[in-house]
Amino acid sequence: MSADANASVSAAHEAGVASEGALDYDGDGILEGENEGSKPATLDGARGGVADDFKQIKGIGPKMEKMCNALGFYHFDQIAAWTPDEEAWVNANLEGFKGCVSRDAWIEQAKLLAAGGETEFSKRVEGGDV
């Protein structure tokens, strides 16, 4: 890599890192922190006692699904309804997984799934390929 390319990579990295080590995970120009965005509406439990299978969303595995449930998110329509400000809050508050909502396009996937559709990934999950 050339010196100019190294300098560009370094400058880009420094622009995304705060003094505390926070990063701009969602690319909105704001460094993530616990107070970024607005917390979305949550539920005390799954409607009808049955949560949606979040593992149908690419980027959500068993551990992440439990974390989402612990935060009060149980259904695709909840994720599908997040505003950019709420997406920023979730991105900043997923311990150990900050920024994954944006990186893995959860909202777009959840909109399809909430409407009864499927994604290529959800088809693979249902087929046992994931």
Image: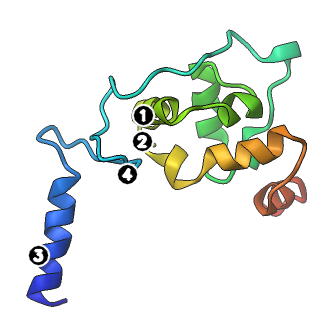
Amino acid at circle 3? Ala
Earlier sequence position, callout 3 versus callout 2: 3
Residue carrying label 4 = 27
Mark 2 and mark 1 in contact? Answer it, CB < 8 Å.
yes
Amino acid at circle 2? Lys
Structural crowding at the residue carrying mark 4, measured as other residues with C-alpha within 10 Å and reported as few (<14), some (14–19) or many (≥20): some
In the image, which disc is placed on residue 7? 3
Q: Nearer the viewer, residue 123 or 25?
A: 25
- Residue shown at the point (75%, 34%) measured from the top left: 76
| Figure quadrant of residue 4 | bottom left
| Figure quadrant of residue 53 | top right
Q: Nearer the viewer, mark 3 or mark 1?
A: 3
In the image, which disc is placed on residue 95? 1
Residue carrying label 2 = 98
Res. 60 visible in picture: no
Measured Cα–Cα span from mark 3 to mark 2:
26 Å
Earlier sequence position, callout 2 versus callout 4: 4
Measured Cα–Cα span from mark 4 to mark 1:
18 Å
